[in-house]
Image (tube, grey):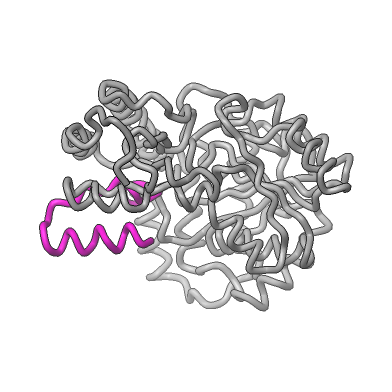
Amino acid sequence: MSVLAAAARRQETHGDVISLCAGQPSTPAPGPVLAAAHHALDTQILGYTEALGIRSLREEIAGYHRRKDGIEVSAEDVVVTTGSSGGFTVLFLAAFDADDTVVMARPGYPAYRNTLQALGCRVHEIDCGADTRFQPTVAHLEAVTAELGHAPAGLIVASPANPTGTIIDAAELEALDRWCAERGTLLVSDEIYHGVTYGRECATAWRSGRDAVVMGSVSKYFSMTGWRIGWMLLPEYLRAPVDRLIGNLTICPPADAQFAAIAAFTPESAAELDAHVERYARNRELVLRRLGEMGVADIAPPDGAFYAYFDVSRWTDDSVAWCAEVLDRTGVALTPGVDFDTANGAHTVRLSFAGDTDGIGEAMDRLGPVLAPAAGPTG
């Protein structure tokens, strides 16, 4: 958020910002969604809905999982939330108690850690490197359990992940799910980037059982970040507490966005959205090629999502100051890695390639002089 604010100030003074920092598509919602939103405004009262979401949207989400993942899902399994962020907060409140230990990967999405800590949970971060594609493994969980003296209360995984874009292999995800189920550890599988992948299989945690929680959202693949509609596939024992918590905390997800989101799951919308993914794929190839030409070698393999997460220790030992300097020199906004990695983030940066290809090409041109070979960190 600080980077976005700095980029906005730069845009006001120079008018030249190319933002590669925001984790969101640069395109509007699909045409059918926009049409459905207009229709809802004209025809619906748009008052409170059921806390768990309108039935028709829950049915569409269930159908989406049946088609995409080949699993049996019913509307009763689906809870619609105020974005996946609202879903995580409600889930953490329902599933964990204060002082419970929840495990996540490092680097990883900072809101998991920040939300859990705000709720009084203990967050145990696992250093995940290139040897495991920056993803946790059963071996990691065994080591954590030995260190704690007991199995953790929860494990959060993201596939594709933010910031790395890496995907957990289907067999490894099944092994994690089985390990968690056998030990009473709740597996929370963040699948909000499903649909944005580049030739690598992306499995759902519900393929192997129903003990896990699956998190989904219309934000990323569906190009609807500001509409604030997410969902959860929940084990039955969590549905009643989640229902009560939503009714107290947010009453219901946004009514207008719920009615509009039904149209996100149509073939017409999918055609638009798949075209965006094709552009992301071209952008990905462009960024990886250009970074390679500039001598950036240590890049997490972006199997999915729309990020390149790479090491900049060749240029700096302070990614926050370095990103500010890059913005000042070039007008290109990048995200420092300190939020994603509390141990090594001073040496890493996340670049989003969700924008238009020409703009990303221009950004890479501007970054060329900055990423010229350097003798060592400059701060």
Q: Residue at x 66, y 58 (%)?
A: 79
Q: Which residues are magenta?
A: 1-29
Quadrant placement of the N terminus: bottom left
Q: Is residue 360 magenta?
A: no
Question: Percent x, y for residue 352?
Answer: 35, 42
Question: Percent x, y for residue 112?
Answer: 60, 55
When the figure is inspected, residue 334 is found, relative to residue 367, above or below; the finding is below
* Residue 175 visible in the displayed image: yes
Question: Percent x, y for residue 343?
Answer: 55, 46
Question: Percent x, y for residue 12?
Answer: 15, 64
Q: Residue at x 38, y 33 (%)?
A: 277
Please give left or right for residue 272 compared with residue 197 in the image: left
Please give left or right for residue 175 compared with residue 113 in the image: right
Q: Nearer the viewer, residue 301 or 234?
A: 301
Q: Nearer the viewer, residue 181 or 373?
A: 373
- Give the quadrant of residue 227: bottom left
Q: Residue at x 17, y 45 (%)?
A: 330
